């Protein structure tokens, strides 16, 4: 997406045909840990808002000394 410039990072959009393929790609993404390639799921705005609320809740719980995972 966007212009390809020398020495610059570019964003790529990949569409998959079904949810199973998406799940396969997302579960294998940790194997790219040191390659400077990041894979994230594209969420709709309502899901992003819900995820932000969950992350905020986890941060508050961790401040209280509890261990929470989203």
Image (cartoon, rainbow, N blue to C red):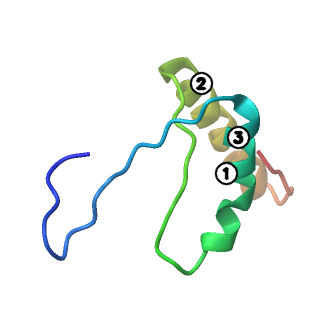
Q: Could you tell me residue 40's position as x and y percent?
A: 55, 48
User: Which element carries disc 3, helix, strand or loop?
Assistant: helix
Residue 59 versus residue 50 in the image, above or below: below
Q: Secondary structure at mark 2?
A: helix
Dot 2 corresponds to which residue? Answer: 47
- Please report the residue visible at 56 percent of the width from the left and 81 percent of the height from the top: 34
Residues at discs 3 and 1 in contact (Cβ within 8 Å):
yes
Q: What is the residue that sits farthest to the top in this orientation?
A: 46
What residue sits right under mark 3 in the picture? 21
Residue reaching furthest to the right: 66
Counting residues from the start of the chain, the first of labels 2 and 1 encountered is 1
Q: CA distance from mark 2 to mark 1?
A: 20 Å
- The crowding category of the residue bearing disc 2, from other C-alpha atoms within 10 Å (few below 14, some 14 to 19, many at least 20), is few
- Residue 26 shows in this picture: yes
Residue at numbered disc 1: 25
| The C terminus: image quadrant | top right
Of the 4 image quadrants, the one containing the N terminus is top left
Q: Label 3, label 1: how many angstroms apart (C-alpha)?
A: 6 Å
Query: Which mark is first along the chain, 3 or 2?
Result: 3
Q: Secondary structure at mark 1?
A: helix
Q: Residue at x 54, y 26 (%)?
A: 49
* 63 up-or-down from 70: above or below: below
Front in this rendered view, residue 67 or 45: 45
Front residue of 49/39: it is: 39
Q: Is 33 placed left or right of 44 in the picture? A: right
Please name which of the two marks, 2 or 1, marks the residue nearer to the observer: 1
Expressed as whole percent of the image width and height from the top left, the position of residue 43 reads: 54, 30
- Badge 3: how crowded within 10 Å, few (<14), some, or many (20+)? few
Quarter of the rendering containing residue 62? bottom right
Residue drawn at the location 28% of the way across and 59% of the way down: 10
**What is the CA distance from the residue labelled 2 to the residue labelled 3?**
20 Å
């Amino acid at each position: 997406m966007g212009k390809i410039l020398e020495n610059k990072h570019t964003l790529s959009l990949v569409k998959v045909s079904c949810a199973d393929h998406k799940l396969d790609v997302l579960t294998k993404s940790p194997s790219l840990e040191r390659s400077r390639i990041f894979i994230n799921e594209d969420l709709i705005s309502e899901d992003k808002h819900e995820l932000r609320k969950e992350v905020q809740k986890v941060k508050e719980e961790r401040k209280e000394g509890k261990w929470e995972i989203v």
